[in-house]
Amino acid sequence: MIPDQAPKEDVFHCNEDLKKESHIPSFERYKELYINSIENPDEFWGAIAKDFFWKTKHTGRFLDYNFDVTKGEIFIKCMEGATTNICYNLLDRNVHEKKLGDKIAFFWEGNEPGDDLTVTYRELLQKVCQFANVLKSQGVKKGDRVSIYMPMVVELVVAMLACVRIGAVHSIVFAGFSAESLCERIIDSQCSLLITADGFYRGDKLINLKLLADEALQKCRDKGFPVKKSIMLKHLSKEPEGVVGSQSPPAKRVCPDLEVPWNPDVDLCWHSLMKEASDQCEPEWCESEDPLFILYTSGSTGKPKGVLHTVSGYLLYAATTFKLVFDHQNDDVYWCTADIGWITGHSYITYGPLANGATSVLFEGLPTYPDVSRMWEIVDKYRVTKFYTAPTAIRLLMKYGSEPVQKYKRKSLKVLGTVGEPINPEAWQWYYSVVGDGRCPIVDTFWQTETGGHVMTPLPAATPMKPGSATFPFFGVVPAILNESGEELEGPSEGYLVFKQPWPGVMRTVYGNHERFETTYFKKFPGYYVTGDGCRRDKDGYYWITGRIDDMLNVSGHLLSTAEVESALVEHKAVAEAAVVSRPHPVKGESLYCFVTLTDGVAYNQALEAELRKQVREKIGAIATPDYIQNAPGLPKTRSGKIMRRVLRKIACDEKDLGDVSTLADSSVVEELFRNRCRTTA
Ligand code: WT7
């Protein structure tokens, strides 16, 4: 499986300086440790667990599991019997045991250049304890679910860790999601409390978050699920006089016209509550398999799945992947540009970095605001050493050439990373040679919301890189490639990417629906966790992710299901039927191409098209805005009435070779759709 020796040709090697300080300095060392992680997981993870604080030790096997649906219920248990608290490990342990109280946990960089602040580990611990007491004062208890809908501010980290401290389960909803999406997620996880903010700027666009949060809560009420309390952080509006320990926003951020409706029965002010709260709070000791958080990800049926992660396994996995994949060193300044509302932000802004006592940049803004040099300006400002972003951001910046990058020195950079989708070799080369000046290895990290952390990735000093390949498995991960009949393929091959055994950070269930967990990931090939991705292995044993093989698509690194976009479209009264397919996009990777059949008597026009776009945005969020909408009086169907999406994909991409269409009921439909296909986006 993993070759004894790394290939010497057609690969990129890391420089010698980096090897000297690296945790895993060679391919041989990687392979040795990898084998140990598979053969002796108790020893491998047990040694890692020693770095953390356990109130009580685990009993029995390190990992216990069943991955085979034919043998009974699927389960994964890690470190059963142990008790701990992750917040304690992230903050108290670093402040008290490791003496990192004065170390900066976050350099917060606001949307507006010049709007910034720093938070040390000690300050973060104090704020988290205070807010944990606030949650308790509102009746939040261990096991309760709390929904968080906030911009990228330090208080978002405070809110999540306060939940963790008292054993409550956070469910963070990305602040770019619509009120409808928030409502759906609140009800699905039965959250008793919402934490939100007044509003924020994304570039020069004002997002009135409180209005959206209120709309979501109203929808919840209408559906018979009243959320008792909503705590609002003032991020844009001025704070009440005399608030201790928090700063008023600088002039350029204050937005006096912001509309902040207030319902005294439900709404509570973050700052007033914090003023009253003590900064001493005993952590709640949790069992290893207690729920830690729920994070929703798109599901191919259209209804999002609440991915559940639990305490001990997730902590170890997020901490270890962060340390080894970014080769973390104490003087690093690490920056991950993701939003905490996605799993990347959970694992690699909050949990992984804080578990390692790292200093990170927490950035509220956009790569293109106020101009396309912003990222590199920030890299120089904080002397960022490890930088982690998405291929879509690289492709976007690449369009502007190297000049905006070269305006800044970027001398501090040591390791670059990507995540979210396959990176095309051209973007890889640009990232490597222009951003990294040919000096920094790139870790192309393949993983999923479900995997909790990186599962296929290079290690910067150990793995020779091939542009576009996620290379080899991380410790504890055993990949296989299966063909359609579920046989494991050996050597160079292509097929379904699956995993043969769990690693500590893998998800435990779909919240409230274990059956869906089993069906989605374990039914197709009994005995394996099925990723939903296609994969190729080359002659050197390198793995290349080829993209989703289900009805999911990846727009700018965000997974969407075609079904959820279709159902948002058909909810419009003018739409009788909708079929959505993916069309490649030079920056976003994939884009949404929607075919809509209108109800009888309705005419297709620009105004309707704009309404449909708005409809999808409001139902799901801006990331799901259709790129193309085509009026389709007829859709290609089989004689049994099934829409032939394969044919629609060809139409969307203008590929005339349709393959076998013998099951098509009426072929004139296809000609008509080709004639009227969309050429440009709105
Ligand atoms: C899907 C998971 C993991 C955090 C962000 C996305 C695709 C992710 C890579 C990569 C090729 C990748 C896969 C995967 N993906 N990283 N390095 N190379 N594809 O999390 O929303 O759960 O999406 O993103 O298709 O299944 P997610």
Image (tube, rainbow, N blue to C red):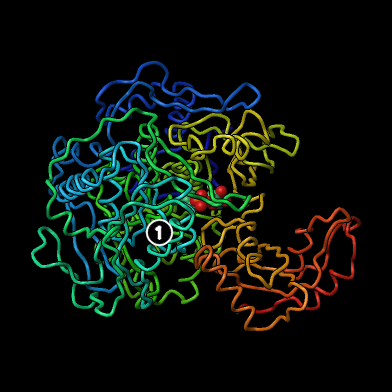
Figure check: 17 above or below 590: above
Relative depth, front residue between 276 and 525: 276
Question: Looking at this view, is 194 or 580 the one in front?
Answer: 194
Q: Position of residue 447 (x, y in %)?
A: 50, 46
Q: Quadrant of the C terminus?
A: bottom right
Q: Amino acid type of disc 1?
A: Leu
The residue most toward the top is 60
Residue 289: % across, % down: 39, 29
**Could you tell me if residue 224 is visible in this image?**
yes
In the picture, residue 664 is in which quadrant?
A: bottom right
Question: How many numbered marks are there?
Answer: 1
| Residue at the extreme bottom | 606
Please report the residue visible at 49 percent of the width from the left and 54 percent of the height from the top.
Answer: 223
Q: Kindly identify the residue that appears in the image at 54 percent across and 32 percent down.
A: 478
Q: Which quarter of the image is occupied by the N terminus?
A: top right
Against 66, residue 409 (above or below) is below
Q: Position of residue 362 (x, y in %)?
A: 29, 59
Viewer-nearest residue: 574 or 332: 574
Toward the viewer: 17 or 602? 602
Is 279 left or right of 598, judged from the image as shown? Answer: left
Label 1: element kind: helix
Disc 1 crowd, CA 10 A, few/some/many (<14, 14-19, 20+): many
In the image, taking residue 559 as reference, residue 356 lies left or right, namely: left
Question: Where residue 402 appears, x then y in whole percent?
Answer: 43, 74
330 sits left or right of 375 in the view: left
Q: Is residue 11 visible?
A: no
> Which residue is drawn at the image coordinates 28% and 52% (left, top)?
157
Question: Above or below — where is 463 with respect to 415?
Answer: above
Q: Quadrant of residue 23?
A: top left
Residue matched to label 1: 217
Residue found at x 19% / y 77%: 251
638 versus 506 height, above or below: below
